[in-house]
Structures are given as C-alpha cells and as structure tokens.
Image: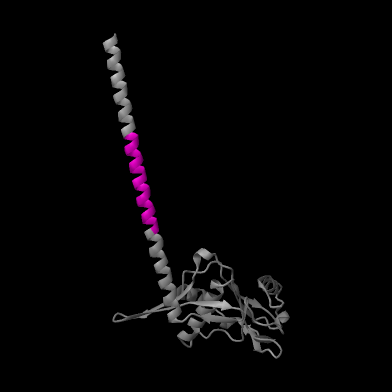
Amino acid sequence: MPLDLNDLKKIVKDHDFDRLVGEIEGQFFDAKEQPYRFSVGMDAKREFAKDVAAFANASGGYILIGVATNPAQRRAGDEVSKIRQISKAIFDVDQHRKLLEEWLFPQPKGIDIDWVPFGQEIDKGIGVIFVPPQDQGGKPFLISRTIGDRKSTDVLIGYAERRVDRTEIKTIAEIHQALRTGLNLERELLGRIANIELLMERYFLAKTEVETSEKRAQVFQERIARLIEEDIG
C-alpha cells in the first residue's frame, strides 16, 4: 500500500529514510532527487510553489529532497530507487519560506521546512517539506506572482492539486469556469439574501402597524369606558 501521512511522519521522525526504497510516490509523497534550482530562474520557483500548493489543495503531504526514483517495473508510478543525500549548504530553509510567501495566496498554515541529517557524512541529509492538511475554509491556495516594472505589470495565477502520484494543474479555461461558477453562485446567494431581508422588513413593518392599530383601539376603548363611567357617576 502507498505510504500515508502517518507512515511518512514516522519515517521522518526516526530518520529512517532507507525504508523509502522500493516505495511508490503517491497521494501524500513526492520525491525529488535534487533540490529546486532557484538560482537558475523562475521555473524552479514556480515548480516549488506548484508542488506545495498541490498538497495544500488536496490532503497534505511530504516533499522529500534527496530521494531518487525510477519508473516502477511492476506497478504504476515512480518507485524510490536510492537515497541520495544532499548537502545542508545547498538547502536554504529561509529561502524556501520566503518563496512561498511571494508565490502563494493565501498562505497555507503550518508548513514545516527542514533539513534532516542522514547517512555517514555529517553535512549530508534530506530536505523535508511537510504540508499539513488545510482547513477547507482557506482553500483554494493559488499560485500567484506579480511581475513588472513601472511601465507594465503581469500577474500570473495558477491552481494545482495533488492527484494520487501526480500534480494536476488546472488550465486557464478550467480556472475561468470555476470563477464564473463561483461568481454566479455568489450573485444568486446575494440576491436570495436581499429578498429574504426585504420580506423580513415587510413582515416586521406590517407587524408594527398591526400592533400600533391594536394599541390605538385599546386606548380609544379605555377613553369611552371612562366617559361612560363619568356620565353614570
């Protein structure tokens, strides 16, 4: 069976990364042989943001860096073939955090980014990025980046979600459809709320008028009763 969050949490906690060999990437596990090459350009930054957003929009998961994979021979997906530790010097935790702040909106909560020592060499280990399951009220988490200068500005927006052992990226047409559906639903709900408020306002206004009329009738009857008593007296 594919590893779940509890399995992966235990592996990371115990530094038992050799256990990963032979395991298949899945819904909660994405293996990277090499660190994201942020210094090369925007592609690596966008890839990192996409991978984190995909887990945040699904059910959470682990990105483990320093874990090599090959296509599985007897099963679908990629299988861990070897642990290839990375140097601590090339895994900048603060840089990863800063990139998420720049590229994701809103910010997923509780993301843990760490470098875990593993193996015989003290400066070698595994980069661990843990994305915990997110509250539904915070979703969706969008890949967003504003690029521009004083003359022009471009805004990049994307949506990704983890599906079994791969990251599914929504096309612009799918994002447009989702936005249109959401906006239409919002308009319909706002219209219904406005109608309910109008009906309640009319109800309470009518109720107030009835109560006022009844009170006037009661006062009028009391005056008549007093006049009758005075005449008799």
* Residue 197 falls left or right of residue 58: left
Name the image colouring: one colour
Position in image of residue 37 (x %, y %): 52, 86
Residue 83 appearing in the image: no
Position in image of residue 38 (x %, y %): 50, 84
The residue located at (70%, 73%) in the rendering is: 7
* Residue 156 falls left or right of residue 139: left
The region drawn magenta spans: 192-212
* Residue 199 falls left or right of residue 80: left
* Residue 201 falls left or right of residue 56: left
The residue located at (31%, 25%) in the rendering is: 219
Magenta segment's dominant SS is helix
Position in image of residue 211 (x %, y %): 35, 35
Name the image quarter holding the C terminus: top left
The residue located at (31%, 28%) in the rendering is: 217
User: Does residue 134 sit above or below 92 in this rendering?
Assistant: above
User: Which sits in the foreground, 114 or 224?
Assistant: 224
Q: Quadrant of residue 212?
A: top left
Q: Quadrant of residue 118?
A: bottom right
Position in image of residue 192 (x %, y %): 39, 58
Which residue is at the far top?
233
Name the image quarter holding the N terminus: bottom right
Residue 40 appearing in the image: yes
Number of dots carrying numbers:
0
User: Which sits in the foreground, 213 or 47?
Assistant: 213
The residue located at (32%, 21%) in the rendering is: 222
Q: Does the stretch in magenta take in 126?
A: no
